[in-house]
Amino acid sequence: SSPSRREMMKVYMERYAKGELNWVIVPYPCHSFAQEANMDIFSYSEFVEKALLLDKEDPVKEWKEIERKQDKLCEILNKVDMIHVLSEDTDLTLSVKGRKWVNCCGHNNLPDGEVFTSPLEDSVNGHIRFTYPGIYSGKEIENIRLDFKDGKVIKATAEKAEELLQEIVAIENANILGEFAIGTNYGITKFTKNMLFDEKMGGTMHCALGSGPIETGSTNQSAIHWDILKDMKAPGSKIIADGKVIYEEGQWKI
């Protein structure tokens, strides 16, 4: 039930924020994952190898270098107040003032490669269209558009499974954005319907509806934390921080 799941999510987020939740996820290439990604097992194995940087001479050294670079990114982003996401089908503003950006660089998950934070709960305004389908309980929701006013979803549409999308945003506090993140792993080049890979894809950003990571300063609690992915490589796509373009057409400008 939603209330019991919300309590579970609360405990999970609290333990994660305190560093008391220990886990490691490393996906092993198998036929079911390959089939879901629309690849043969050999292509998928190669894809996983590149995503984990195992094709590099010294993968550990590579991940440590990513950690160093992303530490610098987070240092800059921690000083930002307002974020503005712009593309042909998106015009979204949100405040991250006082929120912490987190560096994901291989300490818990492999593959890794993202920086994330949480918006102030009442600050999100505008609209965003997600390039890739949202996957929820194994079902695909295609061409999602969310409209926000003062932090809450006021309209949610999709070309496929819109009814399911409406059910999701009706869950308590799932109409609030709990996470804003940018993928940094350019070794991942294909959408595979596996969010462990997809949300890390270089040239993309993602948002999560529902519970926000407590370590960022988020106060939103919900029964779900649901990630949805947007491609940012298209012409004209940019992220503006306090009036300065920091990310354009899939590449950092800072």
Image: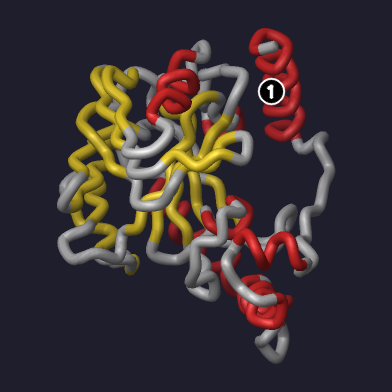
- What amino acid is labelled 1 in the image? Met
Q: Relative to 238, does residue 44 appear above or below in the rendering?
A: below
Q: Relative to 189, does residue 119 appear above or below in the rendering?
A: above
Indicate left or right for 196 with 93 as reference.
right
Image location (x, y in percent) of residue 1: 70, 11
Can residue 2 be seen here? The reply is: yes
Can residue 64 be seen here? The reply is: no
Q: Relative to 156, does residue 48 appear above or below in the rendering?
A: below
Q: Residues within 10 Å of mark 1 (few under 14, many from 20)?
A: some
Q: Relative to 54, does residue 120 appear above or below in the rendering?
A: above
* Residue lying at 22% horizontally and 58% vertically, measured from the top left: 237
* Residue lying at 21% horizontally and 44% vertically, measured from the top left: 90
Image location (x, y in percent) of residue 156: 32, 26
* Residue lying at 25% horizontally and 27% vertically, measured from the top left: 147
Residue that badge 1 annotates: 9
Mark 1 residue element: helix
Indicate left or right for 12 with 180 as reference.
right
* Residue lying at 23% horizontally and 27% vertically, measured from the top left: 125
Image location (x, y in percent) of residue 83: 27, 41
Q: Nearer the viewer, residue 200 or 103?
A: 200
